[in-house]
Amino acid sequence: MTRPLPSTATIGAYFDSRLAIVWSGPQGMTRCPFHADHQPSLSLNAEKGVFFCHGCGAQGGLVEFERLFSRCDLKTARRVIGKLCYGR
């Protein structure tokens, strides 16, 4: 079963809780937490719930970001996203 994407505000709040982001509408930029980054190279899109690093190539959606950021397994990442974004 596919769930609808959480609201842009919810997705933005999720990313903001983990990184210091400069937002321009639904688009955000910050330093990538997945490699030694000195300049902002991580692009975030709160409308689509996706990220892409122009430095190391890390990319994906909310669950993949949580999995990489927290260094947890897929099941745990899904549980965290479900709780934060869907209240489940």
Image (tube, grey):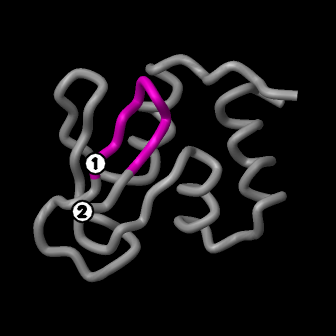
Q: Is residue 22 left or right of residue 65?
A: left
User: Disc 1 marks which residue?
Assistant: 43
Residue in the picture at 19% in, 40% down = 22
Q: Position of residue 8 (x, y in %)?
A: 46, 20
Task: Write down the quadrant of residue 37 in the picture.
Answer: bottom left
Secondary structure found at label 1: strand
Q: Are marks 2 and 1 in contact (CB under 8 Å)?
A: yes
User: Disc 2 marks which residue?
Assistant: 54
Task: Write down the quadrant of residue 32 in the picture.
Answer: bottom left
Q: Is residue 14 left or right of residue 41?
A: right
Quarter of the N terminus within the rendering: top right
- Callout 1 crowding tier (Cα within 10 Å): few <14, some 14–19, many ≥20: many
Q: Is residue 46 left or right of residue 4?
A: left
Find out whether residue 37 is within the magenta segment.
no
Task: Write down the quadrant of residue 59 in the picture.
Answer: bottom left
Q: Which mark is residue 15?
A: none
Q: Earlier in the sequence, mark 2 or mark 1?
A: 1
Q: How far apart in space, not on screen, are marks 2 and 1 (Cα)?
A: 8 Å
Count of marks overlaid on the render:
2
Q: Position of residue 68 (x, y in %)?
A: 56, 67
Given residues 12 and 63, the one toward you in this image is 63
Residue in the picture at 54% in, 46% down = 61
As displayed, is residue 48 above or below residue 4?
below
